[in-house]
Amino acid sequence: MSTTRRGTREKRCSECMVHHLNCFCNKIEKLNLTTKVSILLFKKEVFLPSNTAHLTIKSLSNSQDYQRGHLGQVLPENFIAENQYQPLYLFPTEDAQELTPELLKSFDKPINLIVPDGTWRQAKKVHRREPLLTSIPRVKITPNQKSIYPLRRQKYEFGLCTHEAISYALEILEGPITKSKMMNNLKIFIEAHLINRPIFEKES
């Protein structure tokens, strides 16, 4: 059964999945970046209003997502787009390098930042299960601030939601103004959801 209960679906915006009264679609700033962001979205997350990967896709014109977890599906090569971009896989695996300006200097193409989305348990298996990802350099970020995202519990003290992790990475890839705008979009998202939840609790 979907998190968006049958009785509330018609009252929700089909894009941002909050109550129509609190729709924030027109408040989100759309950014056009050189960096491409590609999100591997676990199929069970697609209809969850609290999923922040949806927000990232809304925030970035140069972005794409792919639903994983369906039987028999294989990641298509055009998702990686190695002819146009240098793919980097953002996840703190044991062999991941810190994403730094110095590391970026070793690449001669714009970056396609590939990011797994889902629970920590789901996300850590992705690069081993998709053959196209096995040879892609893995990178990580080391946040020095705790998450501001309150809608789900983080597994680790400095754990970040997907949108935050991408925002921190884009600070290195595109600069601090980009991160600031991305985080502002997250604050709009959080505020709408915190207002939204009590409405549906009353009606359920």
Image (cartoon, rainbow, N blue to C red):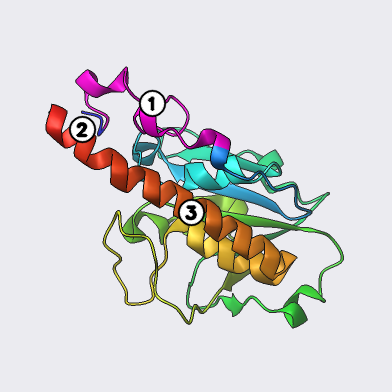
Mark with earlier residue (3, 2): 3
Quarter residue 195 falls in: top left
Quarter residue 182 falls in: bottom right
Q: CA distance from mark 1 to mark 3?
A: 18 Å
Q: Which residue is depicted at the point 47% across and 49% down?
A: 188
> What amino acid is at disc 2?
Phe
Dot 3 crowding, Cα within 10 Å, few <14, some 14–19, many 20+: many
Q: Position of residue 94 (x, y in %)?
A: 48, 78
Q: CA distance from mark 3 to mark 2?
A: 21 Å
Q: Is residue 127 visible?
A: no
Task: Describe the element under mark 3 as helix, strand or loop.
Answer: helix
Quarter residue 121 falls in: bottom left
Disc number for residue 186:
3
Q: Which residue is depicted at the point 32% across and 17% down?
A: 10
Q: Is residue 109 visible?
A: yes
The N terminus - image quarter: top left
Residue identifier under label 2? 200
- Taking 124 as reference, is 81 above or below it? above
Disc number for residue 20:
1
In the picture as drawn, the residue positioned furthest to the right comes out as: 108
Task: Describe the element under mark 1 as helix, strand or loop.
Answer: helix
Mark with earlier residue (1, 2): 1
> What amino acid is at disc 3?
Leu
> What amino acid is at disc 1?
His
Q: Position of residue 101 (x, y in %)?
A: 74, 78
Pointer 3 and pointer 2: residues touching (CB < 8 Å)? no
* Highlighted range, magenta: 4-26
The C terminus - image quarter: top left
